[in-house]
Amino acid sequence: MTSTILNRINMGFIASLIGFTSSIALIYQAASNLGADIVMISSWVFALGLGMGLSSIGLSIYYRTPLLIAWSTPGAALLITSTQGFSINEAVAAFIFSACLITLSGISGLFEKLMNRVPLQIASAMLAGILLSFGIDVFNVMNESPLLVGLMFITYLVCKSLIPRFAMLAILIVGITSASMQGLFVVPDLEWNIGQLVYIEPEWNLAALINIGFPLFLVTMATQNMPGIAILKAHGYHAPVSKLMTVTGITNMLIAPFGGFGINLAAITAAICMSEEADQDPKKRYWAAVSAGAFYLLMGVCALSLMTLFQAMPSALIYALAGIALFSTIGSSLQQAFVESPYKEAALMTFLVTASDFTLWHISSALWGIAAGLITIVISGLVTAKKSVPVKA
């Protein structure tokens, strides 16, 4: 029982750690471009941590499903280029506008109807395509830090066979210890101060709504919420999609005036909480998402200090930890995607497009992978139907 609880906490910690460290630099740059100082930037992180933490904990416990909420990483990247020429007040108004559109998507039920038409094999193929680069990166960063990543990988192989429930905990300990001994991770002097929320008065500007708010909505839905639902589906979880969109949209509206530009269903980090390492019983894995939500709250409160600490961690440690944590999910997703069925060819197209670097109109390969799979199904169906039409003598 104790080992199971530790696994849930550990996987929740890893998910939240990766969620913060993987894109905190994007948020810092996006806020800085709008003229925010370090206090206001920490307010952005505090607001996001508060929204993600409370919604992750509340939704996961209520639905008994690992529903991890994250900030929109593609959204943060979009803000770096789309906010030029606008003030931070106009940007905040655009954040609220985007959140309203997400809420309307949930209330109308259109997004859920769309996702219900996506076959499980296509969802699994997209998940495998999304996660593939994370698994490969383990061996890419081994070039940079062979001793650090090599020790973590060997620890995984040994512990996966001998003590699978403690595998990720052992990998985390070995990684931090090895990085410290090699001088790659030096804990900086920190002053632990509780963060503060800084209210930013929205300034409504039609151009900002069109150039910031609407693209932010599209990117968040297409590259974050859609993969998030697909990952839930691929793991056998059936959550009320429309209600989730409504809750995340309303929460987003509440935190937007403090810099909470966009929250959504997590994809990569959610897969960590849904893995076997989190809990052998799929019905209990929601506790890992609850754990991650608690760490998000803690990170939000201590945003200013933690940003300094996370920046001191070697990137090789973060990449290796993320990739190794996703090994089992990548394997099971590939297995589900390529079982013999009429959707096998469509699953292959989805996997290849999603795993590529293809982007168009600021929409990532994840959405285009789904589109490629569905187009393959439609074309195959039309060809099959044409072949089955009897030829008149």
Image (tube, grey):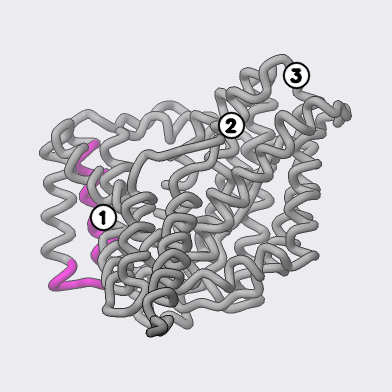
> Relative to residue 264, is residue 94 drawn left or right?
right
> Relative to residue 372, is residue 193 drawn left or right?
right
Does 171 lie within the magenta span?
yes
Asked whether the residues under the numbered discs 3 and 1 touch, taking CB atoms below 8 Å apart as contact, a structural biologist would say: no
x and y percentages locating residue 2 in the rendered image: 37, 77
Residue 5 visible in rendering:
no
Q: Tell me if mark 1 has few (under 14), some (14-19) or many (20+) residues whose alpha carbon lies within 10 angstroms of its own.
A: many
- The residue sitting at the front extreme is 393
Q: Quadrant of residue 240?
A: bottom right
* Residue receiving disc 1: 324
Over which residues does the magenta segment extend? Answer: 160-179
x and y percentages locating residue 199 in the rendered image: 81, 33
Q: Alpha-carbon distance for marks 1 and 2? A: 28 Å
Q: Which amino acid does label 2 sit on?
A: Leu
- Asked if 361 appears above or below 240 in the picture, the reply is above
Please, what secondary structure does the residue beneath circle 2 have? helix
Q: What residue type is labelled 3?
A: Phe
Tell which circle, 1 or 2, labels the residue nearer the N-terminal end: 2
* Residue receiving disc 2: 78
- Identify the residue at horizontal 75%, vertical 23% (top origin): 88
Residue 392 visible in rendering:
yes
- Identify the residue at horizontal 52%, vertical 30% (top origin): 26
Q: Tell me if mark 2 has few (under 14), some (14-19) or many (20+) residues whose alpha carbon lies within 10 angstroms of its own.
A: some
x and y percentages locating residue 218 in the rendered image: 64, 45
Q: Alpha-carbon distance for marks 3 and 1? A: 41 Å
> Relative to residue 241, is residue 235 drawn left or right?
left
Asked whether the residues under the numbered discs 1 and 2 touch, taking CB atoms below 8 Å apart as contact, a structural biologist would say: no
Q: Residue 86 carries which label?
A: 3
